[in-house]
Every structure is written in C-alpha cells, then in structure tokens.
Image (cartoon, rainbow, N blue to C red):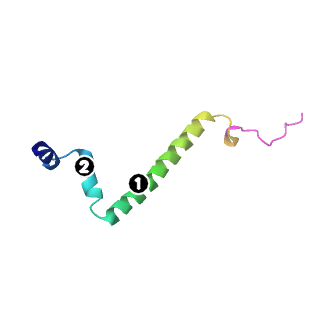
Amino acid sequence: MDSAARRSTAGGGIFEGLYKVLMRRNSIYVTFVVVGAYFGERAVDYGVHKLWEMNNVGKRYEDIPVLGQRPAEE
C-alpha cells in the first residue's frame, strides 16, 4: 500500500501532467477539443490535397494547354 501511495504522489508521467492541466476546468477542456479538432481538420485537409495533387500531376485541367482549342487549319 505504501508503494502505491508513493507512486501516485511522485511526479507522474507526461500524460498525467497533461491530464491535470487540461481537465482542471471544463472550459479549458472544451477549448482544447475545439481547437484540436480545427487544426486536426486543417492538417488532414492539407495532407489529402497534397496527396491528390501528387497522384494527378499531368491529368488536371490546368495541365492540358490545348484543352478546348480546335486544331489550326492550314
């Protein structure tokens, strides 16, 4: 029992410290979740966009210079 009491009071880990900081108030927790969701969405959107561009180089509308033009008659 003594070792369990020492373990809980001794510093803790990084996750325990984050838990204590984020869970101290409901407003901090909700703000962390909302800001994290926003930046997480932005990161996923950026990554998927870059992946799509890498896989479609040369196939996009902007990459075809003569699209919609008729061949010149000679």
Instruction: Give neighbour class at mark 1: few <14, some 14-19, many 20+ (Cα, 10 Å).
Output: few
Toward the viewer: 71 or 36?
A: 36
Q: Residue 14 sits in which quadrant?
A: top left
Residue under label 1, please give it.
Answer: 36
The N terminus appears in which quarter of the rendering? top left
Residue 31: x and y in percent read: 37, 62
Residue under label 2, please give it.
Answer: 16
Residue 23: x and y in percent read: 29, 59
Disc 1 marks which amino acid?
A: Gly
Q: Nearer the viewer, mark 1 or mark 2?
A: 2
Q: Residue 36 sits in which quadrant?
A: bottom left
View extreme (front): residue: 1
Q: Is disc 1 in contact with disc 2, using a CB cutoff of under 8 Å?
A: no
Q: Residue at x 23, y 51 (%)?
A: 17
Residue 37: x and y in percent read: 44, 54
Q: Residue at x 68, y 36 (%)?
A: 59
Magenta residues, as a range?
63-74
Toward the viewer: 59 or 35?
A: 35
The C terminus appears in which quarter of the rendering? top right
Per the image, is 8 magenta?
A: no
Instruction: Give neighbour class at mark 2: few <14, some 14-19, many 20+ (Cα, 10 Å).
Output: few
Toward the viewer: 1 or 72?
A: 1
Disc 2 marks which amino acid?
A: Glu
Q: Along the horizontal axis of the image, is 60 left or right of 7?
A: right
- Is 38 drawn above or below residue 15 in the view shown? below
Q: Secondary structure at mark 2?
A: helix
Q: Residue at x 51, y 42 (%)?
A: 47
Prevalent SS, magenta region: loop
